[in-house]
Amino acid sequence: DGALGACGRVERGTLIQAKGHAYDLSALVADQALADALDGGQFITVYLSPRDYHRVHTPSAGTVRAYHYVPGQRWPVSPRFVEAVDRLFAVNERVVIEVASPWGPMAVVMVAATGVGNVWLEHAGHDTRAWRRADRVVHHQVGAEVAAGDQLGAFLLGSTVVLVLPPGAP
């Protein structure tokens, strides 16, 4: 459920936010090693409006390795703001869900927005409020096996998900 915002290939560590707006994968995932592993892969950005389904599921079987909470702004993520705010997905608060897939690591990035500061994390058993108080990047190791379609987390309102697959993923 949601609207396709952008999709394409990650080229030289860069993703497209909107026409004429690019941003760095390493800034989005806040981890240079993960960004390097994903370079050359594919990405898709899905905008979730308040009327859409707000649960996020894994696109393939694998292992949820970690949740990486990254503090930041909470700009609106509607198409109008995506076109106007430079690097919006890499400056907004977000949770990077690192999943070991059959093709290599993938990142499911849940980007917070205005009014969407609480993200439920299925395998952490809580939402992001406690981590927000720390006001720093928080790495939470998980190690949970998941099947394709298993729930990873949920927005407690609408927002955006950026999925980045490694090179070679179908």
Image (spheres, grey):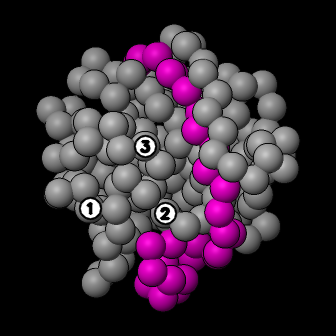
Question: Residue tagged by mark 2?
Answer: 90
Question: Residue tagged by mark 1?
Answer: 14
Q: Is mark 3 on a helix, strand or loop?
A: loop
Q: Quadrant of residue 124?
A: top right
Q: For the residue carrying disc 1, how many other residues have a C-alpha within 10 Å: few (<14), some (14-19), or many (20+)?
A: some
Question: Which amino acid type is marked by label 3?
Answer: Asp
Q: What's the magenta region?
A: 61-88
Relative horizontal placement of residue 77, taking residue 118 as reference (left or right):
left
Quick check: 31 above or below 125? below
- Looking at the image, is mark 2 or mark 1 earlier in the sequence? 1
Name the mark nearer the viewer: 2 or 3: 3
Q: For the residue carrying disc 2, how many other residues have a C-alpha within 10 Å: few (<14), some (14-19), or many (20+)?
A: many
Viewer-side residue, 152 vs 72: 72
User: Distance of mark 1 from mark 3, alpha carbons?
Assistant: 14 Å
Q: Where is residue 147 in the image (x, y as percent from the top left)?
A: 47, 16
Asked if residue 83 lies in the magenta stretch, the reply is yes
Quick check: 170 above or below 35? above
> Where, quadrant-wise, is the C terminus in this rendering?
top left
Q: Is mark 1 on a helix, strand or loop?
A: strand
Viewer-side residue, 15 vs 146: 15
User: Distance of mark 2 from mark 3, alpha carbons?
Assistant: 12 Å
- Looking at the image, is mark 1 or mark 3 earlier in the sequence? 1
